[in-house]
Image: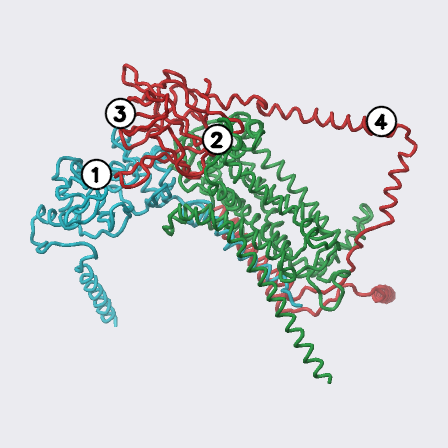
Amino acid sequence: MRTRAKLKFALLAALGFLRGAGRRRKREPIVEAEGGDPRAELVVALLLLAAAACALMFVVVYALDWPKLTQWLGLCLGACLLLIAAALIYAGESFVPTEQLEEDYPPLEHPEEQLEIAQIGSESVRGFSRRRLLLGAAGAAGAALGAALVVPAASLGPFLDTESFYYSPWRRDRRLVDEDGKPYRAAEIEYETFYTAFPEGAYREELAAPLVVVRINPAELDLPPGRQNWAPEGILAYSKICTHAGCAIALYRKPRFPQAEPGPALVCPCHYSTFNPADGGTVIFGPAGRDLPQLPLLVDSAGELRAGGDFSGPVGPSFWGVRTRRPTA
Amino acid sequence: MIRRTIRFLDQRSGSAPLLKKALRYVFPDHWSFLLGEVALYAFVVLVATGVYLTFFFEPSTAKTVYHGSYAPLRGMEMSRAYASVVHLSFDVKAGLLIRQTHHWAADVFVAAIVLHLIRVFFTGAYRKPRELTYLIGVAMLFAVLLEGYLGYSLIDDLLSGMGLAIGYGVALSIPFVGANLALLIWGHPFPGDPAFWSRMYIGHVLILPLLIGGLLSAHLALVSSRHHTQFKPKRIDGERKVTGIPTFPGQLPRSLGLMIAVAGVLVLLGGLVQINPIWLWGPYHVYDGTNGAQPDWYLGWLIGALRLVPHFDVVVWNRTLVPNPFWGGILFPLVVMATLMAWPWLERRATGDRRAHNVLDRPRDAPVRTGVGAGFLTWVAMIFMAGSADRVLVFLGISYVSQLWFYRVAVWIAPIAVGVVAWRLCLGLKGMEEVQAEQEAAVRSARLE
Amino acid sequence: MRWNRKALLAAVLLGGLAIAAIAAAQPPSGVVRPPGGAEQKQMQLGAGLFAANCASCHGPMGEGVLAAGNRGVGDIAGEGPNLVGVGEQAPDFYLRTGRMPLDHAGEEPERQRPVFNSREIAAITAYVASFGGGPKVPEPQPDFGSLPEGMSLFAEHCAGCHQITGEGGYVPGAKVPVLGHANATEIAEAVRIGPFLMPKFPPSQISDDDLDKLIAYVLRSKHPEDAGGWGIGHIGPVPEGIVAWFVAIFVLGGVCAVIGRRLSS
């Protein structure tokens, strides 16, 4: 009984195997497999195991929060990835079947389908009697809808009102204060250095707020006409924002000895536009195309520095149509 | 098991024929064809690391006081954006690794795109029927430049703030619409409305990645539908038949290996080489600036152009019409982009060659193209190098003004010189090959006799 | 064996010292040392060295040679500023950082190995200070507890030229020095005197307390916290771009070359 069953099972299995093998034998091979390479396979396995070790190390380092954590994490993960990459590439170069195949390039065009598409299009509208009208109306609807959908974008900014570029927080009698809010006194402004000043009580993080203040011997000043009393005691104030691209004028070049030419100059570190503070902020080097706006100064009865009005021109980078008109408060 | 999975999928998606075709898709084999793949994998790394970064970054200019573990900034007032990146760098385990990997990936991404573009140009791969693929590629390059700029600008450190100020100045300089455009983008004169940070953020993490992803998909779909170009094969008609390694099994370990190698190199750099140490730059204020401020390398050509242009605005009746940054910041990149995009058609008009090409030229096979390309590349590269003149002064002591004047002349002369040399070189190489071929033919016929 | 090695080491060290001593005994080129320097009193030594090396531009009594084309001592063409009232601060700074003497009047004084030894520097400094009044060599106490304030002060007054981590830069007409070699005293002196093109920052603008914070920031910037790994110069994008191209792209290009074939036909 038991032996018969066993025999029957074996017979069936053999039959099945033969049938299966027969079916497999019928199929032509697709991949031209080469012989294996046990040694290379071992190397690949070792590389992958090393990668696994690195990845585990990454987890351990992370959990233990080692000093120089970023470096250890990068080293572990980077090494893990590079080991996997090495394993894959080595496998590809050694034992993964690498066949050289040929294939036709796809045809450049399908003339029949092209014709059919055009035909479908024209036949679909052949019956329409007011084709031009419909086309025009659809065009109008599409264009109008497009315009309507684009219009809300204007809310992103005061699109048409460019008056804000002429705005400045400076007005007559506003005091100049330092970074801590302490008013500057004329007597403490020294030669051969520069000061950063802000409008008292105004927001500082906007282009028209910060000033650079320097003091130059009045005899050496050559200010444009109309600005003769803008620099009391030789103290000059200019916008701290470059008229080229809006960076801060963070350099004051002050030659210790007259041999170094040119003389005192305000410089922007972005593209090295250089302005002459002695003659009203004209450009003497670099790409800026407009003078640095000057702020008229007053010294009040307490000896403190105050604005004598607004800038000589709009502050910040130039734009189409910018005029050298005084900004408006 | 595998058979069952395949059957399950095929019955529900009907994709077996497509999958079979994809597995046996033929990749022509040349090392330079992999440069585009490097760019693709860098993008994958960028998306993966970028998603992680969004979990920590706060796109807000609201003021806060820093109290994290980095002592030199403790107690300083700064924007939440900047504080969140300092926090990410010092108090989030693996945060700095991911951030630095992201930044390295961006630098390498653009470098790989540029190299890929150079390969495509000098082999004539953009010719019919692949002009659209090429156009999409060039468009992607410029989208990526903008994406990178937004990425490092978001942090609100001293360098990025200066970069944004320059971007604002450049936007303002566009004739006629500049001021309106800048107001649309910033919402208010610089540094802009608080909402500007949300706009920049959504641009960086959603709009531009979607755009780049979409263009990338179209680019890859077009490559596969027209099939890849190849260098002239020996035995077969390369215009009709493509030869190479199939996706599976031959190409898979190689491409997968390359992808993981790209990720590995970027992670290794991210862990070991410091990039954009924003905690050293400090927070940005409109009234602060630092010497030697530079953009990331891929925008270096623009700062070079901005610095090279002599100081003139177009002024009529005391009104500035074309402010200076326009020339270097807008016109120059537009000329570069337009030239790149128009090139396939310019070449077609010049040569009258309207045929489809599946076989690539070697650079020497098209001496004029190679000359023009080398000259154009030199032009952009010289302007790029001019942007680092201030650092060259610090390291090598060469006067800045001399360098400026050298570049102002050299950017026009060097491209012509390089172009002519490249052109002559190609002719020479080709001539040599012809002589060699003639000699071989002579030897062969002598043997026959 | 062990003794032999030690003896060898000692011999090498002694030989090295001897060579160094001989080299140090040679006067550096361009500097004139009046005879008998070693025995002279400080003032005498200072006066002699000043007359021989400084007076051609600064005048025999430090009054300066101010007008272009004027000739100084020994009919040497030179122009240099008045030194009366500069005190110890300026000569100490210029001489100890090797910025003086210059080869030619008008060139940018750059940091070098000082050409005078410390005794000579002290002597010249004392001699120049004797022209009349002026500040002494400052003695700053770097305040490492207030680094954020130091950074803000540096960003406002210094970073425009020196770069935010003190890596130097460019200003029209000059190369701005890297601050990596400057010590606390030199930083304090430079802030107060404003060498060459640099503005000078008086105590009314940067108080001594603020100066201590500023100095702490600069000293700390020499060894910044490189949490991200290798610092590649702390100037940001330029070296980063170089690494991206010449490390990352180079390596990945190599991987491509391994995977892909070369042009064979």
Q: In terms of depth relative to the viewer, which is nearer, C1 or A71? A: A71
Label 1 sits on what residue type? Glu
- Choose top left, top right, bottom left or bottom right for residue C174: top left
Q: In terms of depth relative to the viewer, which is nearer, C63 or A54? A: C63
Left or right: residue A248 compared with residue A2: left
Q: Earlier in the sequence, mark 3 or mark 2?
A: 3
Which residue extends farthest bottom? B449
Chain A drawn colour: red
Chain C drawn colour: cyan
Both labels 1 and 2 in a single chain: no
Which residue was labeled with disc 4? Answer: A133
Label 4 sits on what residue type? Leu
What's the mark number on residue A188? 3
Both labels 1 and 4 in a single chain: no
Return the chain for callout 1.
C
Spatial CA distance of label 1 from label 3 is 24 Å
Left or right: residue B310 compared with residue A90: left
Which residue was labeled with disc 2? Answer: A317
Decide if residue A300 is in sight here.
Answer: yes
Where residue A179 sits: x, y (%)?
Answer: 36, 26
Give the structural element (helix, strand or loop) at label 2. loop
Label 3 sits on what residue type? Glu
What's the mark number on residue C139? 1
